[in-house]
Structures are given as structure tokens and as C-alpha cells.
Image (cartoon, rainbow, N blue to C red):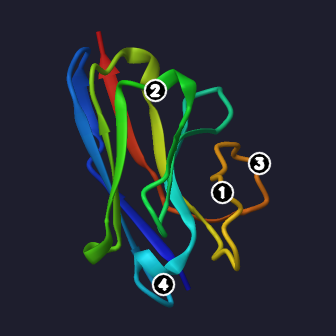
Amino acid sequence: HVQLVESGGGSVQAGGSLRLSCVASGLTDGFRFDSRCIGWFRQAPGKAREGVAVVYTGADNAFYADSVKGRFTISQDIAKNSVYLLMNSLQPDVTATYYCVSTGRFGRWPGWCPLESTSPTLAHWGQGTQVTVSS
């Protein structure tokens, strides 16, 4: 049973940075051979969940929402079965609960990772970590 545990959220002033971490457990194989997409989604109060950044564990292919390109960076540590989200130049509009999310294991990776929260490929969600940016 795959479990995802997030950490690293908090409150920062506008212009600051935060680094979120997610550790995955219960994988059949290590990250590099697990062949799934894992990354970050968020939900702000009164808004729908949306994809932020996702990476394919079998390589380093990363996919970003247009709104965070150039400011957020997703990375993974194969040895630690972990994925990270470095968020720079934070503004109040990114205040949300951030969730670590993964797809199921691919038999053959389709060459993309989902950024839509309604994607049927998304299989596992963490509990979420709160990010609050004040002006």
C-alpha cells in the first residue's frame, strides 16, 4: 500500500521561499524502477484542486502548471524515494494546502504526467501540508 507523507509547509512573507518534501513508502521497487508519476497538487480555499508540478520517477521528466513555471522546481531523490518542491518568489496567491500525489504504476509510461486533479491515473494522495504566504 503506497503512502505519501508531506512536510515542509509553513507561513512565509511574500517574496520568500519554501521547500516541500514528500516521502513515498510501500513501493514495490525503488523510485527509478517504479514507473509512476509523483508530484504536487494544491487546493486553495473555495477553489478546485489543481496540479502544480509532477515528475516521472523512471527518469527526470518534469511537468509544470503554467502559473508556476520559472518559480517552482520539482526534484526527486531516488535513494530516498522522495520528491521535493522548491518554491521561490512566493506570493499570497499560492496560499493553499499542497498535496503529494502519485499515479498508479505504469506498465508502460505514456510519456506524460497528469496535472488535472480529475485524472483517473491519480491513485494515491497524501494528507496535505499548508502553505500560507502573507503580503
Looking at the rendered image, the quarter that the N terminus falls into is bottom right
Q: Nearer the viewer, residue 134 or 56?
A: 56
Residue at the image position 48 percent from the left and 59 percent from the top: 127
Residue at the image position 20 percent from the left and 22 percent from the top: 16
N-terminal of the pair, mark 1 or mark 3, is 1
State the separation of the CA atoms marked 1 and 4: 21 Å
**Vertical side of 24 occupied by 62: above or below:** above
State the separation of the CA atoms marked 1 and 3: 18 Å
Q: Is residue 10 visible?
A: yes
Q: Which mark is residue 118?
A: 3
Look at label 1 and name its amino acid. Answer: Gly
N-terminal of the pair, mark 4 or mark 2, is 4
Look at label 3 and name its amino acid. Answer: Thr
Q: Is residue 100 visible?
A: no
The residue wearing badge 4 is 27
Q: Which mark is residue 68?
A: 2
Q: Element under label 2?
A: helix
Q: Nearer the viewer, residue 87 or 1?
A: 87
Q: Element under label 3?
A: loop
Q: Which mark is residue 111?
A: 1
Residue 134 picture location, percent across and down: 30, 16
State the separation of the CA atoms marked 3 and 2: 20 Å
State the separation of the CA atoms marked 4 and 3: 23 Å
Residue at the image position 35 percent from the left and 73 percent from the top: 81
Q: Nearer the viewer, residue 123 or 45?
A: 123
Residue at the image position 64 percent from the left and 39 percent from the top: 49
Is the residue under label 2 in contact with that under label 1 (CB below 8 Å)? Answer: no
Residue 25 picture location, percent across and down: 41, 80
Q: Quadrant of residue 88?
A: top left
Is the residue under label 2 in contact with that under label 3 (CB below 8 Å)? Answer: no
Few, some or many residues within 10 Å of mark 4 (<14, 14–19, 20+): some
